[in-house]
Amino acid sequence: MNFRDTMLDEYKEILKTYINDQTEQSLYMSQKFSRKSIEFKISPEEMISLHKTSIMELEPELPESLLLSLDILLEVMMSYGLAYREHQSLRMIQRELINEIEVAASMQQTLLGTQIPRIPSMDIGAISVPAKQMSGDYYHFVSHENGAISVAIADIIGKGIPAALCMSMIKYSMDSMPDDSQAPGDVLERLNRVVEQNVDPTMFITMFSGLYNPETHMFFYSSAGHEPGFFYHAETGVFDEMQAKGLLLGVDKKAKYREYERKVEVGDVILLMSDGVTECRTEEGFLEVDTLIGYIKKYIHLGAQDIADKVYKELEYLQDFQLRDDFTLIILKRTS
Amino acid sequence: MDSSVKIINEWDIVAARQLGRNVAKELGFGTVDQARITTAISELARNIYLYAGQGEITIEKVENGAKKGLTIISCDEGPGIPDLRKVMEDGFSTSGGLGAGLPGVKRLMDEFSIESTPGEGTLIKSVKWLR
């Protein structure tokens, strides 16, 4: 039997019990009743009407004025009823939107997917975690025919869906780049032109582009306003910032990007990151560089992927598991 | 039988409600449905009063086979509604505290149709069936 058919009797029973004994028990019953009536979409005005019908049957001697007052209550509840129904329908729309964003986010993961290259002399690890569902961070690896490895990490200034849409464009212009243009400076110059032409002028992208030659163990890099990475010298145990100058992508179509280089010795580690790592905020303020380096040092003996995962875990804990910005960390560790 | 109320000032909203309530009672609608019908009439009449300046609310009895019901017709020669989809969206008209809006009317009633031409006016028909 449907609740709608039995609700009058149920309600009358609760009312009758309460009029007789005023116990907490009957008040609790009415709370349970209201949950059920919401479940069956009984509107507030229907509840008033139900109440009126019940009390008229239970107490036929009630003064007319009291019953009439319920008409006013019913009329007043009309707008509450409408607001309630509107709320229900907006909630449904919200649920639909959340579903759609989830689909888009998983599509983004597929679209932006990149394979971490496996080469003998270099151990590579990467982690990228979006703050919201869609990420504005991006990293990309390319294994070239001559054995060299390109790595790129980018951050869209701005978050969420617009940033994510912009990412897809970057990804496809990188994919369509000819294999012979590997130099990091050239890569940035090309992308800069694409971004300058196609992206909204209020949207900027920072990017770090690197190229590792496994024969000479040279690492070449250029930066378009991106967070500088760190270079760990295994021999001395010293970290230094890989400063590189260059304009953000999309600002000036004639921008040139200077190329820098480092010799990578066995045990040396290159750490590339998005500002979600360095600008990680805790209750005491921004994360200090020394604190970050401290965490990296703690795990520097591990494999590249483990370093990335562990550092992320530490920073996640430090921020009470609430990322304020997309987080991307790439580790390149020369093993032989 | 059909009858109408011209909506020119706020008190005409009350007259339109009264007319709707009388017809609804006559047809045998219960108190909750009477309240729904009059609330819908209020909304439509208020829209005329606030946005069109003047217009008319007509209440008709309808029959469809064994089904009986009540139709509210709201007609004005006001500025019209340029974006119908927008006004039929939840949260659009209500956010400014303007009441239930047209989506509210649609929810209170069983059938709802709207025609509007910018510069010419708006015609809304809405039916509530007797259960």
Image (spheres, rainbow, N blue to C red):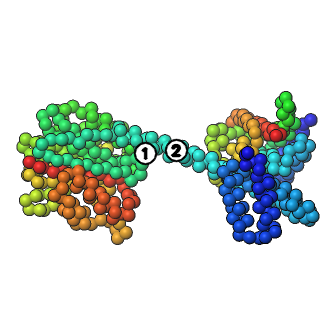
Label 2: chain letter: A
Residue kind at label 1, given as amino acid type: Ile
Q: Position of residue B35 (x, y in %)?
A: 81, 50
**In this rendering, position of residue A36 left or right of residue A12:** left
Q: Is residue B46 visible?
A: no
In this view, the mark in front (2 or 1): 2
Q: Position of residue A184 (x, y in %)?
A: 19, 42
Count neighbours of disc 1 (C-alpha within 10 A) and say few if under 14, some if 14 to 19, many if 20 or more: some
- Element under label 1? helix
Name the residue that disc number 1 marks.
A161
Label 1: chain letter: A
**A58 versus A120 height, above or below:** below
Q: Quadrant of residue A180?
A: top left
Q: Residue furthest top?
A: B65
Q: Is residue B37 visible?
A: yes
Q: Position of residue B47 (x, y in %)?
A: 75, 46
**In this rendering, position of residue A269 left or right of residue B119:** left
Q: Position of residue A72 (x, y in %)?
A: 83, 59
Name the residue that disc number 2 marks.
A97
Q: Nearer the viewer, residue B14 or A138?
A: A138
